[in-house]
Image (cartoon, helix red, strand yellow):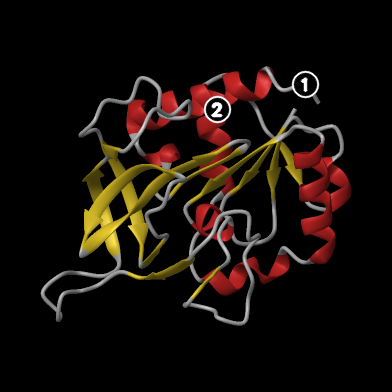
């Protein structure tokens, strides 16, 4: 069972449709108790990092419990940013803190570059990734964001817009993409298929 976490800040309808397109319908999780029995969790999200304030202690405890039991966690856009310690967009709101570093605003290069970063841009893989298997270097995917995560050892692919940022991360059971796979055509569907296959192999 793959649970889509509904905390009031996600593009849930398009994410559901994309997973349905790869024959993996999602179960909506409106409360932490709804995560019981899930082999994988999806944290969507668009907009301000402050929206993740809703992922409070009860949600965190339930998510950590599922991870301890062997579930996967997949963050999309704002959901990826939430995997980190936090964001300068909302300094008083902590992230999950499973990945080190803080998300920061993209550089508009003195007003010469448009922020938010909206549209198609290329992926540059940095290391082998189960999530990005079958997605060649240079593949274009769809972004819409103003803040981004730092590049680190957990980065699976980067993209350039004002600076180099983490476009995809993978660290054990944690995975995330800054772009929107549900809006990225066949490349996005390939990524979702990869995630579903990995979820089907989980022991929990």
Residue at 24%, 31% in the rendered image: 137
Check disc 2 and report its element: helix, strand or loop. Answer: helix
Check disc 1 and report its element: helix, strand or loop. Answer: loop
Q: How far across and how far down the image is residue 103, in percent?
A: 45, 67
105 over 99 or under it: above or below = below
Displayed quadrant of residue 52: bottom right
For mark 2, does the 10 Å Cα neighbourhood hold few (<14), some (14 to 19), or many (20 or more) residues?
many
Between residue 1 and residue 17, name the one nearer to us.
1
Residue at 39%, 27% in the rendered image: 128
Q: How far across and how far down the image is residue 105, in percent?
A: 36, 72
Image side of residue 190 versus residue 33, left or right: left
Residue at 87%, 38% in the rendered image: 36
Q: How far across and how far down the image is residue 150, in percent?
A: 39, 60
Residue at image mark 2: 195
Image side of residue 150 versus residue 65, left or right: left
12 over 186 or under it: above or below = below
127 over 7 or under it: above or below = above
Residue at 22%, 59% in the rendered image: 161
Which mark, residue 130? none
Q: How far across and how far down the image is residue 186, in percent?
A: 35, 25
**Mark-to-mark CA distance, 2 and 1:** 15 Å
- Quadrant containing the N terminus is top right
């Amino acid at each position: 069972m793959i649970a889509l976490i509904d905390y009031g800040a996600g593009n849930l309808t398009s994410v559901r449709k994309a997973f349905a397109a790869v024959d993996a319908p999602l179960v909506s999780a409106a409360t932490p108790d709804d995560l019981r029995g899930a082999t994988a969790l999806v944290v969507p999200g668009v907009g301000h990092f402050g929206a993740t304030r809703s992922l409070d202690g009860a949600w965190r405890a339930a998510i950590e419990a599922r991870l301890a039991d062997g579930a996967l966690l997949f963050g999309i856009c704002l959901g990826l940013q939430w995997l980190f310690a936090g964001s300068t967009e909302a300094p008083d709101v902590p992230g999950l803190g499973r990945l080190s570093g803080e998300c920061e605003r993209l550089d508009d290069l003195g007003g010469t570059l448009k922020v938010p970063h909206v549209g198609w841009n290329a992926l540059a893989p940095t290391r082998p990734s189960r999530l990005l298997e079958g997605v060649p270097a240079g593949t274009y995917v769809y972004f819409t964001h103003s803040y981004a995560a730092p590049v680190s050892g957990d980065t699976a692919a980067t993209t350039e817009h004002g600076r180099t940022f983490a476009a995809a991360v993978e660290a054990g059971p944690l995975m995330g993409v800054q772009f929107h796979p549900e809006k990225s055509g066949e490349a996005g569907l390939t990524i979702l298929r990869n995630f579903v296959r990995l979820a089907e192999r989980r022991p929990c």
